Amino acid sequence: MGDLKFGDAFDYAAAPETTPVPLQKQYELFLDGEFVAPSSGKYFWSVNPSNGKRHARIARGEEKDVDAAVRSARKAYEKVWGPMAPAERGKYLYRIARLIQEKARELAILETMDGGKPIKESRDVDLPLVAAHFFYYAGWADKLEYAFPGGRPEPVGVASQVIPWNFPLLMAAWKIAPALACGNTVVLKPAETTSVTAMHLAQIFQDAGLPPGVVNIVTGAGETGAALIDHPGVDKVAFTGSTAVGKAIAESVADTTKRLTLELGGKAANIVFEDAAIEQAVEGVINGIYFNQGHVCCAGSRLLLQESIHDDFIARLDRRIETLRVGDPLDKNTDIGAINSREQLGRITKLIGSGIEEGAELHESSAKLPEDGFWCRPSFFTGVSASHRIAREEIFGPVLSVLTFRTPAEAVARANDTCYGLSAGIWTDKGSKIFQVADQIRAGVIWANTFNKFDPTSPFGGFKESGFGREGGLQGLRPYVQLG
Ligand code: NAP
Ligand code: MG
């Protein structure tokens, strides 16, 4: 082994998850409280991104199924869930939260198998937050008049919710829990590449005795999502995903009375001042971009470094990315799992190519990648200018773009030089600088001396092309109530 110095990378023994996995061969639609075959009889494959193998068949819901789901949700809203005493609704949500906790380990494994994220993230971040969201909103169910004093909150009706593949269960929880707490019913469309855990969540709804139709889940492609959003029986649309699809949705609901909230892309600045605790900032920057392979809308994908610390910081980042363990997402030691899909890997690779072409310098880990499946080494670019595509477009992968600044004013100008406004990070030892800079950054979430911290009590959402409306916290109730 030679002389091992503190901080050297060394090999761990493999530590794969050993819990048996309850993956089914085939998943049906969840309509009116039952698991039913799609009207078309068609299915599509979900792939395990860590080996590229098809591992489950998913029902392809079409317009007819969407229509059945919306009708079921309407009936449940009018006959059961709407009229139910709020405290009773809360009891269902508590029961769901407890069942999620009980099944957390197997749900985490499924999330990792179907989506590619490391088990330590699905187990320690995603699942605890999923349960916490249901617990949190369960608590609000019978206290809505305190959330909106004097407002006499009423539910909105039937909500159609379309979610992405980066946090499949967590996005489902963010959407479903506040909707139900306020007395609405739901039709949810998971992302094509990550439908498996949504169907296990449906099983939990059934096990909890949630009345039929309160939540319906229709799996399928983009057209299924479009059919759901365009359905005339829907009162409220909630979407998380790409800005392009978000804009199309905004157009399609523009001449209706449907309410809309959009949570779209981001290109967050993570700003490190020379007076920051440097080692801590390095860890924060690493977590900010490589968490969940960078499949994070609020990822700190633009690192803004104060010029005086640039060379030292880059040297530390070079060393740190070498120690990140890339590989089997089910291994408990893995830091960077698989890219969610071949398509996403293609998008990331293209943008890395554009960075090289436009003259930025690529720093890449030398990690050996598994042969099968979809993989991308953690990397970052130096010598990036504000006009480069890698500084402007969402890469949604483990690729960081580094820019520099001299003064706080320049840092603010650079941070705001984007069409997005979802999140930002500030690293400094000086509290007054945190407030001064945070006040001037147009972003919905700003972390100070930390990054990618989530909590159900805290609202999340964007400015500008990152969308509108808030999820989480008391603010997350607002899209799901009408005030009389
Ligand atoms: P996307 O197309 O916006 O997908 C998000 C969700 O919308 C999925 O459930 C998708 O279904 C559905 N969908 C697609 N077209 C639709 C339409 N016309 N009407 C209604 N629903 C529709 O995102 P993507 O193609 O998976 O990813 C592309 C890029 O979007 C990424 O590279 C990333 O930059 C960004 N992104 C952002 C977020 C975020 O959290 N803000 C999340 C994911 C992706 P299918 O899965 O069946 O297509
Ligand atoms: Mg999959």
Image (cartoon, rainbow, N blue to C red):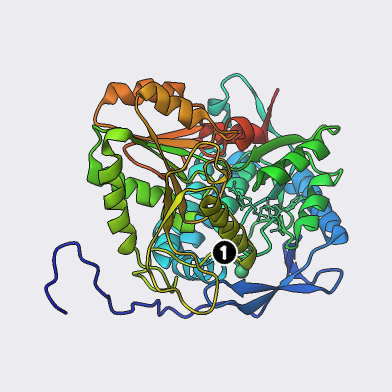
Query: Foreground: 391 or 169?
Result: 391
In percent of the image, x 86 and y 70: which residue is there? 40
Q: Is mark 1 within 8 Å of ligand 2?
A: yes
In percent of the image, x 52 and y 56: which residue is there? 397
In this orientation, does residue 83 appear? Answer: no
Left or right of 91 on screen, residue 321: left
Quadrant hosting residue 18: bottom left
Counting other residues with Cα less than 10 Å from the Cα at mark 1, is it few (<14), some (14-19), or many (20 or more)? Answer: many
In percent of the image, x 57 and y 69: which residue is there? 114
Circle 1 residue? 340
Indicate the quadrant containing the C terminus: top left, top right, bottom left or bottom right: top right
Residue 232: image location, x then y, percent: 87, 43
Q: Is residue 309 above or below residue 295?
A: above
Q: Is residue 260 above or below residue 73?
A: above
Residue 49: image location, x then y, percent: 56, 71
Query: Foreground: 381 or 471?
Result: 381
Left or right of 207 on screen, residue 120: left
Query: Foreground: 480 or 119?
Result: 119
Indicate the quadrant containing the N terminus: top left, top right, bottom left or bottom right: bottom left
SS state under label 1: loop
Circle 1: residue type:
Asn
Residue 145: image location, x then y, percent: 58, 27
Q: Is residue 346 above or below residue 54?
A: above
Residue 416: image location, x then y, percent: 51, 28
